[in-house]
Structures are given as structure tokens and as C-alpha cells.
């Protein structure tokens, strides 16, 4: 047993953003730290990941990263044979998403008649966590922290609660997180929807990322809007204030902390070839260089509790290759324990720890695993009358953020509008996304893209082209493609839930089971996004190619302007809400320090703590909260000696 | 002669060596013979009777079908003014033409590749005839031609049979990480492969047609 035991001041499960930031802060203060990472450790360089990305026939978020969930022949790998598996984009198809022989997440339902929808987001399990993130770092706005107080008056069934902390409490920690991640943005441009900065004269670490040609095109389109046609938005923001703003991003606009400025490789998701985009391995390496111990290929399997406090964490160490069932049982012992394993794996671990407490660790409220949220994305795409040259620059450089808050939030979900620089690569149906789909269409005379029609080419429908006709047609059409995404606030729903499945992974641990749906409140937000899309497209003079596949299990109908419209949502990769923070131990899992109400030496960090999610990408907020928690741990650690 | 053969066998010859080889050895078609022979799947390729000229024929065919100049497809190509088929295809650091030539030979279950090469040879004086003649050929030849163009455009191999049957989700494979980075479609669209750019910070805020920008790719430029 002695050989299997690790002892340290603070044990952390998970080496993603939150885990790495906390480890690094603690090491700076001389606290001994060990981190359990379920997947592989940090690689000597990213060359192997780049090769995997270049060689992948679909450049999906998981494409650079191990373990393989699709084999050499393109067949799905049975997740029961993988030690630390994960959900992937390629296992979300209509035929796969409820098949537990193909998909890691169990999304089956016991009640055949109950409508259930797919949870479409994915994550990684390796050192550095979800490095496939886009790198966008907007802040939540003040009203995101007080939804019930601001918009819930007189609404008994308003599903939102307030956070136990305010924007002003988090604000200084936002600044610290922006320094650590290296955020490029312009403070003056970001003063909207109540955003203020706690340091007078605050400037972001780097200047903002320049706007793309498409960003400017949309800016010009917004300038044509009038009050009457935007009335449906129900916002007090004057129409003249609806502008395109550069998005804060953890993307270097100049050399920063020994990393290069962005060179516009247009592959932020899934991987930046020059690490101009921050990922958590940067902080993790600093922590390990400074003495933090990283134990990779180590899956936490049970949190042990004695006299109300956590006394150790059992983990299984497995071989380098996934699929090994042979695991060595080990225990890590510490004064304080931090679980930073994301919004699905953290509740899974808490619920798996049921030998001593039947409901699972930290779960006296019965809230662990509940209120799973994402930012459902309404994805739209179209063709402009003339070129804006996409596939150049970061995937997203700008957004329309001003619609993220307003009185309409009493009735419908808010959204943020991000402008894509990656054309139809992630939206068009067909093999491998674009430009593959459009290219195949014009070489083989098909029309999966919708573009191979006389209206757009002055050529016969379904033309199969060679030579100059081909170069001119593809050059002309692809350079005019664009996409716009509406990230919608999801309302918390206790029935959207992570539980334990009866199906197991390669280490014989129960896999996560997911129940998920989208509320009417959220659907109304998607419907408003649909109307805003129509308006923006008309001002752009764009042809709309947005469509919803009949087989899409997320599809739903809404009557909008007397027409029945088919709508759906995509996953944003934001795993939130499943161990919510609050002041009341009966209705929340952690307090504002992210400490378990039940166990004084257990902290649960990450976006699983968000009781409501606003519309901002969660990484900056979870990073700010992690830094705040690290500070707190240093403060309270002596009392655990 | 033997010296040259050994270098050419390695497909991805280092640049310095490659340029030494290609610049010096331009005297005769006989020399180019060995260079191409080295990359041919000799055992299976019925069309390899005259392998030296096959690589040049491949480049002529590819130029006609892709609409992108042969000098772009084979940057170290040194042309023989008297007889194009005697040209030296050259060896460049990426040498994607050799990868593709071998791949097509290995993956053509019909004898269409040989026929397409012959068609290119026969029309070497009037490349404009190649497209109509390919379009007038048997389905197997047309679909292999389309797979070849897809290879150049995307670095991926689409099964010709699936193209022929207009399968909604054709079998497709990225030939190699390097092949992906050489895809022409990105350049045709004024862009670069996602994840593979040698441009500088901020370029995306400028119109590529702007005089201060690198300019748009001209497929016909030699």
C-alpha cells in the first residue's frame, strides 16, 4: 500500500484549466500538490497532435487528441474497451448517439415515450483538458449573476437563481485570469451590458485581435437596422448601439509569456499549431516545473470520506494504451482535495463514491449531476453577393454581444452572436464539412452543399467541372461563404441530469448517463435568434443556406411570423451547472468558494459550479473562480494541518 | 546514374540534395526515366511501359483537369522545349506529385489510369482537348479523373467507385498529413489549409486583393 500512496497538501483531480491554474497558484505559495490526470500527460511537443489533425478526414474537435474512439477503418471503438473514453463529435450522429456500443455517453432513456434530446457537446480527457477550445474569453455581465432578482420578480416558476457572488466580487479575479490566460481585447470596447473593470484605467494584457473582412461586412449591415424591425428583440438597447465588437480572446496579439502572436492559422478549434492560443498545458507545465506532481493515466474512481471529511481518493493507474483493463489500485492522501474534472466527469466521480454515502459524496442536496446546461447554438450559414475571403484568421474574431442582456430575459433566453471566419466548415452537411463538401459537389456533379445550382453558378444544376471552370466556380463561391452562430442561454432544469449508467468503461467504472432537453424558455430564445438571423441576412443581401437535417434528433418546430419553422441547436462544448454553487446547502452543492457544503476539505471547481450560465463562453469565468479558490485554499490550509 | 536513382527513391528528398539533382541532370529523357521508375508500382502497373514520360503525362493531365498550372503542381519541373514528354519532373521538398502518382497506381482497380496517361500523351500539344475527351470516356475513366482532381484539391482519396455511384457518403481517406497541407482548394479560394498558414499576424483584416497583401492565387500562373 505504501508504494501506492501519494501524500501531499492538496490533491487535484483533473489537469484542465481549473486544475492547472489552482496547482500553479498553490505551488507559487509553496503548497505541495499532486494532480491526477485520467488521460495522457503533456507531450514533449504538439507535432503528433498536428499530424493526427492533418490526417483526419473530418477536422472535428477531437481529431488531434487521443484516445482513438474511431479505428483505422472508420468504425467506432466500443467505449467499454477504452480506459478513459469521452464523447466525440463523430459519435453524435443520428445512428450513434443512443447506441452505447458506439457512444461513450449513455443517452438512452428508460421511458420509450419520453422525448429526450441529444446533449451535443464533447470534451477531452488528457493533460491540459479541453485544449480544443476556441479561446474566446468574454466576461459574464452583472445581470448574469442575479437573474432571479433582476428578471424573476412575480414569476413563481422562473427557473433561474442568483449566484451567491456578484460581478463585482469576481471582477478582480477576471483581471487575474485575463493575465494568466493572456487575453487580447480593448477595455473601452468591452464596456457594455454593465461591464466595468475593478482597476482604474484597466487595460487587457494585449490589444484586441483585428476584425476580419466579414466582421466589417456585418458591422455595415447592422448600421442599416431601424427601430421598427428590431422591436421583436424586446431590448432597451437602441438599435444604433448594436455593433460588432472584437471578442476578447486568449489569443496573442503580440508575443506574450514566450508565446508567439497569432498567425491566423484558422484552426483554433481543435488546435493552434503555434500555441498562440492559450491552453492549460502552459500553466500546467509551469506548475510541474515548479514541483507539482502530475500523475497521468490515472483515473480517480472513489472519494473516501471519514468523519465527514475526505480522507483520500482512490485511483486506477492504467497502461499507456487505452483499452487496458488491468489497473493498479492506488490512493492519494492530502489535507484538501479539489475535483476539477469537468461538468460531466466531476458529478460522475461524486456519484461513483457511494460506498460510504449512498447518495454519493457532496450530494446531501441531491443536486449533484442535475441542471446540466450548455449554450445551445443556433448555427446559420449563407452566401454573400461578393467575397469576404473566409478561412483566414482566427475562427472567430468578433461578435454582437449587446443582445446578451435585457428585459426580454423575463420571457425568453438571451443570445450572443458570433461571426465565423471559417465559412461552412462546421455547418454544412456531408462528408468532412467544407470545403470538402462543396469541392466534391462541383467535381462529381452532386449538390450536398446546395450551391450546385444555376442560380449561383450560371451553369446547369449539378455541374461536374474540370479545369478553369472548376477553379473559378470554387474560388467564387467559397470566398463568399459565411456562418453566424447564436449562442443561447439555457435555463437550468433539474431533470437535465448526469447519473451513472449500467454500462461500463474499460476500467469497469460506470459511464455517465445523460438526460437532456431544451426548455420552452430556451426555445423562445432560439426562435428570436431565427428572426434576428433573417434580419441580418437581409441586410447583408445574403442567400440563406441554413437547414435542419430531417434526421436531427434535436430538431423542433416553432411558429414564427405565422410560419412553422424547423429549428435545432448544436453543442457549444460548455459543460455547466451540475454541481451548482449557492448559499443554501439544501439546494446547492458548493458555496461561493466552491467548497462542498457537506465536506469541509473538498472543493469542486469548474463550470459545473455555475448556477446559471448567461451567454459568455465559460472558460474565463471558471478560471477566475479557480484563482479565487486557490487563494482561499492557501488561506485555510493551515487550519487543516 | 545509380547515384541519382538512389536519391529519387526516397520521395521526400531533402531540399538541398533535390535541387542539386534537378538542376544538373537535365540532359536527356533517359535520365528522367530512372527518377520516375523509382516511384512506380512496377509490379502492378500495366501502363508503366514508359515510366519516364508517365510522370510528365500525369502532370499534363493534372494541369488540364485541375485548372492549376503544372509548374504549381511540380515546382521543380524543368521542361524540354522540343518534347515535353522528355522533361524532368524534378524533385521538390514536398514532392506531392510522386505521392499522388504512386497512390493512384495503387488504388486504380481498373486500367483507367494508364488510359488517362495515354490520353494526356496523345493530346500533349493541345491540352484543351483533354477535358472534352475525358468527359467522353467510359465512366471508370471519368470517375478516376474526378478522384485525381479531388486528390489535388483536398489531399484526400475518394473511392472512384463511390463517385460513380454518387454515394451520399463516399469512402474518403486523407492520403497523408502532408497531402492535406497541399490541398489546392484553399488556395483557389484565396485562403490556406486550416491549421497550415505561413502568413503573419493581422493579415485577415486586409483584402487579399489589396496591393499590400500577398495577392490572390492565380491558378494559371506559371
Image (cartoon, rainbow, N blue to C red):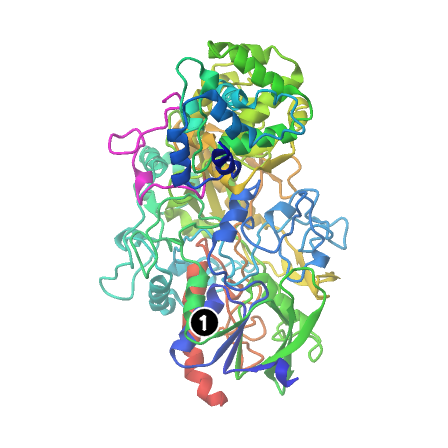
Taking the image as shown, residue A266 lies to the left or right of residue B215, namely right
Which residue is depicted at the point 31% across and 51% down?
Answer: A253
Q: Nearer the viewer, residue A431 or A635?
A: A431
Can residue A436 be seen from the camera position used here? no
Taking the image as shown, residue A30 lies to the left or right of residue A68, namely left
Does B23 sit above or below residue A529? above
Q: Position of residue A249 (x, y in %)?
A: 37, 53
Q: Nearer the viewer, residue B90 or A638?
A: B90
Q: Which residue is mark 1?
A: A288
Can residue A548 be seen from the camera position used here? yes
Q: Chain of mark 1?
A: A
Total marks shown come to 1
Q: Nearer the viewer, residue B74 or A56?
A: B74
Q: Position of residue A494 (x, y in %)?
A: 62, 61
Which residue is depicted at the point 45% across and 54% down?
Answer: A617
Q: Nearer the viewer, residue B221 or A124?
A: B221
Taking the image as shown, residue A615 lies to the left or right of residue B101, namely left
Q: Position of residue A516 (x, y in %)?
A: 64, 54
| Magenta part, dominant SS | loop
Residue B121: in magenta span: no
The image quarter containing residue B207 is: top left
SS state under label 1: helix
Does B3 sit above or below residue B72? below
Which region shows up in magenta?
B194-222
Does A180 sit above or below residue B83? below
Q: Position of residue A382 (x, y in %)?
A: 47, 31
Quadrant containing the N terminus of chain A is bottom right
The image quarter containing residue B18 is: top left
Residue B216: in magenta span: yes
Residue with the most extreme left position: A201
Report crowding for label 1: few under 14, some 14 to 19, many 20 or more residues within 10 A (C-alpha). Answer: some
Which residue is depicted at the point 72% across and 58% down?
Answer: A80
Amino acid at each position: 500500500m505504501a508504494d501506492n500512496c501519494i501524500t501531499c497538501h492538496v490533491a487535484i483531480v483533473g489537469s484542465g484549466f481549473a486544475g492547472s491554474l489552482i496547482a500553479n497558484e498553490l505551488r507559487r505559495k509553496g503548497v505541495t500538490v499532486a494532480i491526477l490526470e485520467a488521460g495522457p500527460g503533456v507531450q514533449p511537443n504538439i507535432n503528433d497532435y498536428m499530424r493526427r489533425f492533418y490526417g483526419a478526414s473530418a477536422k472535428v474537435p477531437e481529431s488531434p487528441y487521443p484516445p482513438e474512439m474511431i479505428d483505422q477503418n472508420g468504425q467506432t471503438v466500443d467505449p467499454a474497451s477504452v480506459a478513459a473514453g469521452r464523447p466525440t463529435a463523430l459519435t453524435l450522429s443520428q445512428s450513434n448517439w443512443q447506441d452505447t456500443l458506439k457512444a461513450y455517453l449513455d443517452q438512452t432513456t428508460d421511458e420509450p415515450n419520453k422525448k429526450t434530446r441529444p446533449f451535443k457537446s464533447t470534451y477531452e480527457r488528457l493533460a491540459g483538458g479541453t485544449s480544443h477550445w476556441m479561446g474566446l474569453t468574454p466576461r459574464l455581465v452583472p445581470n448574469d449573476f442575479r437573474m432571479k432578482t433582476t428578471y424573476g420578480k412575480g414569476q413563481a416558476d422562473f427557473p433561474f437563481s442568483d449566484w451567491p457572488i456578484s460581478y463585482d466580487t469576481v471582477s478582480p479575479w477576471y483581471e487575474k485570469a485575463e493575465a494568466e490566460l493572456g487575453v487580447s481585447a480593448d477595455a473601452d470596447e468591452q464596456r457594455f451590458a454593465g461591464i466595468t473593470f475593478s482597476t482604474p484605467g484597466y487595460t487587457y494584457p494585449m490589444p484586441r485581435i483585428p476584425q476580419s473582412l466579414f466582421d466589417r461586412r456585418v458591422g455595415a449591415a447592422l448600421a442599416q437596422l431601424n427601430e421598427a424591425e428590431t422591436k421583436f428583440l424586446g431590448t432597451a438597447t437602441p438599435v444604433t448601439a448594436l455593433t460588432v465588437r472584437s471578442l476578447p480572446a486568449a489569443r496573442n496579439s503580440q508575443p506574450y509569456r514566450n508565446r508567439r502572436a497569432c498567425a491566423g492559422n484558422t484552426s483554433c478549434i481543435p488546435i493552434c499549431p503555434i500555441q498562440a492560443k492559450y491552453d492549460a498545458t502552459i500553466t500546467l507545465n509551469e506548475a510541474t516545473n515548479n514541483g507539482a506532481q502530475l500523475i497521468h493515466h490515472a483515473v480517480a474512481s472513489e472519494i473516501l470520506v471519514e468523519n465527514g471529511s475526505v480522507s483520500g481518493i482512490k485511483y486506477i493507474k492504467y497502461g499507456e494504451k487505452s483499452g487496458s483493463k488491468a489497473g493498479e489500485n492506488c490512493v492519494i492522501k492530502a489535507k484538501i482535495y479539489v475535483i476539477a474534472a469537468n461538468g460531466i466527469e466531476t458529478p460522475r466521480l461524486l456519484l461513483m463514491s457511494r460506498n460510504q454515502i449512498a447518495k454519493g459524496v457532496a450530494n446531501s442536496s441531491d443536486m449533484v449531476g442535475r441542471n446540466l446546461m450548455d449554450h445551445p447554438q443556433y448555427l446559420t450559414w449563407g452566401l454573400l453577393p461578393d467575397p469576404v475571403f473566409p478561412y483566414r484568421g482566427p475562427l472567430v474574431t468578433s461578435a454582437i454581444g449587446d443582445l446578451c442582456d435585457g428585459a426580454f430575459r423575463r420571457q425568453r433566453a438571451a443570445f450572443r452572436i458570433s461571426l465565423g471566419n471559417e465559412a461552412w466548415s462546421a455547418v454544412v452537411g456531408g462528408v468532412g464539412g467544407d470545403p470538402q463538401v462543396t469541392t466534391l459537389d462541383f467535381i462529381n456533379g452532386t449538390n450536398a452543399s446546395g450551391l450546385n445550382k444555376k442560380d449561383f453558378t450560371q451553369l446547369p444544376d449539378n455541374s461536374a467541372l474540370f479545369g478553369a471552370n472548376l477553379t473559378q466556380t470554387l474560388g467564387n463561391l467559397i470566398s463568399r461563404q459565411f456562418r453566424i452562430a447564436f449562442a443561447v442561454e439555457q435555463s437550468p432544469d433539474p431533470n437535465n441530469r448526469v447519473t451513472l449508467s449500467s454500462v461500463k468503461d474499460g476500467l469497469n467504472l460506470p459511464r455517465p448517463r445523460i438526460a437532456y432537453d431544451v426548455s420552452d424558455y430556451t426555445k423562445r430564445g432560439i426562435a428570436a435568434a431565427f428572426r434576428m438571423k433573417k434580419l441580418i441576412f437581409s441586410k447583408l443581401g445574403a442567400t440563406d443556406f441554413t437547414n435542419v437535417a430531417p434526421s436531427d434528433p434535436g430538431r423542433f418546430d416553432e411558429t414564427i411570423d405565422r410560419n412553422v419553422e424547423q429549428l435545432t441547436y448544436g453543442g457549444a462544448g460548455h459543460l455547466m451547472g451540475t454541481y451548482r454553487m449557492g448559499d443554501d446547502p439544501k439546494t446547492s452543492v458548493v458555496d461561493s468558494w466552491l467548497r462542498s457544503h457537506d465536506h469541509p476539505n473538498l472543493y469542486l471547481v469548474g463550470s459545473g459550479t455555475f448556477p446559471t450560465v448567461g451567454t459568455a463562453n465559460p472558460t474565463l469565468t471558471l478560471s477566475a473562480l479557480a484563482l479565487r479558490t486557490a487563494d482561499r485554499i492557501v488561506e485555510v490550509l493551515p487550519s487543516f494541518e | 546514374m545509380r547515384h541519382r536513382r538512389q536519391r529519387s527513391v526516397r520521395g521526400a528528398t531533402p531540399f538541398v540534395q533535390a535541387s542539386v539533382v534537378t538542376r544538373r541532370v537535365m540532359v536527356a529523357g533517359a535520365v528522367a526515366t530512372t527518377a520516375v521508375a523509382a516511384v512506380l508500382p512496377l509490379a502492378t502497373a500495366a501502363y508503366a511501359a514508359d515510366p519516364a514520360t508517365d510522370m510528365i503525362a500525369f502532370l499534363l493531365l493534372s494541369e488540364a483537369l485541375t485548372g492549376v498550372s503544372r509548374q504549381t503542381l511540380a515546382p521543380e519541373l524543368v521542361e524540354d522545349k522540343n518534347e515535353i514528354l522528355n522533361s524532368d519532373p524534378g524533385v521538390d521538398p514536398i514532392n506531392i506529385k510522386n505521392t499522388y502518382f504512386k497512390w493512384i497506381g495503387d488504388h486504380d482497380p481498373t486500367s483507367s489510369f494508364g488510359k488517362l496517361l495515354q490520353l494526356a500523351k496523345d493530346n500533349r500539344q493541345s491540352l484543351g482537348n483533354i477535358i472534352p475527351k475525358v468527359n467522353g470516356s467510359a465512366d471508370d475513366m471519368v470517375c478516376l479523373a474526378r478522384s485525381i482532381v479531388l486528390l489535388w484539391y483536398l489531399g484526400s482519396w475518394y473511392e472512384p467507385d463511390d463517385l460513380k455511384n454518387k454515394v451520399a457518403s463516399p469512402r474518403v481517406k486523407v492520403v497523408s498529413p502532408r497531402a492535406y497541407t497541399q490541398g489546392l482548394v484553399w488556395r483557389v479560394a484565396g485562403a490556406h489549409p486550416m491549421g497550415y498558414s505561413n502568413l503573419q499576424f493581422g493579415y485577415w483584416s486586409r483584402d487579399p486583393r489589396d496591393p499590400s497583401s500577398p495577392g490572390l492565387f492565380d491558378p494559371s500562373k506559371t
